[in-house]
Image: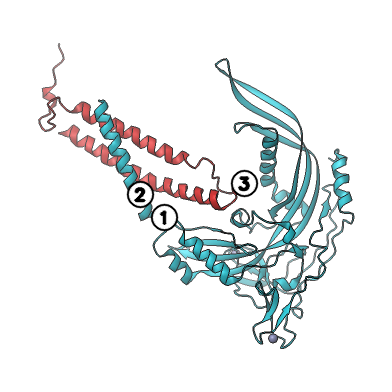
Amino acid sequence: MSTYLSSLAAAALLFGLSTYFGVFVLESLIRRREAQREAQVESASHVRAQGRWLAPTVWILTVFWLALFVGYFIASTTPPNGSLKHFNTRDLPRPAV
Amino acid sequence: MFTHSSAILRVSRRSPSPSPTEESPPSQRELSCNACGNQCRFDPAQEALICDGCGNAQVIAAANQYRAGREYPFDPNSPETEPRGVPPAQEHQCSGCGGTVLFSGTALSERCPYCNGPMVLVPGRSGYDAMALIPFRISAEDARKRALDWISKREGAPNQLTEHVARTARTAGLYAPFWTFDTSEALTYMATWMEYEHKRMVTRSSSGHHDVAFDDLLVPASPHVTPLIRDGILHEFAPGALRSFDARYLAGFAAERHHQSVAEGFAFNAPDKRLRTKRKVCEDRAFGENVSLAVRTDDIAARYRRILLPVWIFHYDHSGRPYKVVVSGINGQTFGERPYSTAKLALVSGLVSFLVVSVGIVLGMVLA
Ligand SMILES: [Zn+2]
Ligand SMILES: [Zn+2]
């Protein structure tokens, strides 16, 4: 039961953090796109439009890998009969003494 | 410093008389209506001085244009002889950003065109007269339409932003001070980069001499002229449109006078110019993106021109923060600052996150 809850919490936390950081990523993406389309971004002092896909790519990939890990964790802590409710650490085979 | 004499000679021959002549600053009499004596304003559509009192229009005859195309040589090793002058009227100084501007004729607003701060009258500060300018061609109404159109096309902007800006924005028409620099430089460069060779990284380098020239490089002549103005809207600046300085073009607008000496102007724009120079060397020598380049100027020949360029600046506030939209007075090119709607961005971000997280979790479970 507790593993089930903690994997649920991990998924929710991941979703929340991703949404939070995504706002900044999207804002900088729009800003760079506007600068690249409409202004001359040559000067040293101006916002650099080069590499505007870097931040979104890093964001998506990081979230994807973390989600992959969470999914793996959920699946590997689920007993073969599939029912999470009856899963208990007491059911695990005891190590030979 | 001057070892590359051919460049100097070439430059000097093109511009034989080195001392800029003094230009008469705007006199109030020159700007008053010849029918009723009221103050006039320059109207971009009619290219004339218009009297709002009686409707009289005096067309500004483009007389002697020789000064518009003229450039002056600059020798960093000899003292500058250009005369400084005090403006005939009091100037307005901003209590916010410290910028000083001159309002002539009937000005639209007496707030700071740069930051919208309150201004106080101060005695005219000694400065330099501009040699040429491009008069406003875009009217205030046209500029306003372009600014609102720009705002309305923003992605992820708060709801009703256009209506809010239309209701609250304050407009300022400004002649902003700029330099045009022609330079021809002899450089020594040293380029270093990393390369794979037989499965290991090796450092490679190359060095040599290179000549770099700039023609009519447009750079700001005041710290108040932000990159928003130059890089945002004036990158298509065509020096052919310059006219000899005539104070009547300033009527009804704010203008910042030139205060930098030529040496100060060069120093002020040095980081920007270094970046452009390096980019040019990289392009000419076909260096890749990962090359680190050091350049040394062995010799420079330069010519300059002090000019004023017309800019419409719109100030508006959103959630207690000030924003600016700038419109070129030459061709209407528009660029600016704008707020973002956190709710809209969060919605998109949430959707993307939900998709990525669920696909990741499902895939992770399948792989387990
Ligand atoms: Zn009149
Ligand atoms: Zn100000």
Q: Within 8 Å of ligand 2, the CB of disc 2?
A: no
Tell me how the rendering is colored.
Answer: by chain
Where ligand 2 lies, by image quadrant?
bottom right
How far apart in space, not on screen, are marks 1 and 3 (Cα)? Answer: 25 Å
Q: Nearer the viewer, residue B149 or A89?
A: B149
| Residue B98 screen position, x and y as percent | 63, 63
Q: Label 2 is placed on what type of residue?
A: Val
Q: Within 8 Å of ligand 2, the CB of disc 1?
A: no
On residue B156, which mark appears? 1
Q: Nearer the viewer, residue B259 or B227?
A: B227
The chain in cyan: B
Q: Label 1 is placed on what type of residue?
A: Gly
Q: Chain of mark 1?
A: B
Q: Which residue is mark 2?
A: B348
Q: Colour of chain A?
A: red
Q: Which residue is mark 3?
A: A42
The answer to whether residue B362 is left or right of residue B283 is: left
| Residue B315 screen position, x and y as percent | 53, 65
Q: Is residue A4 above or below residue A20?
A: above
Q: Label 3 is placed on what type of residue?
A: Glu
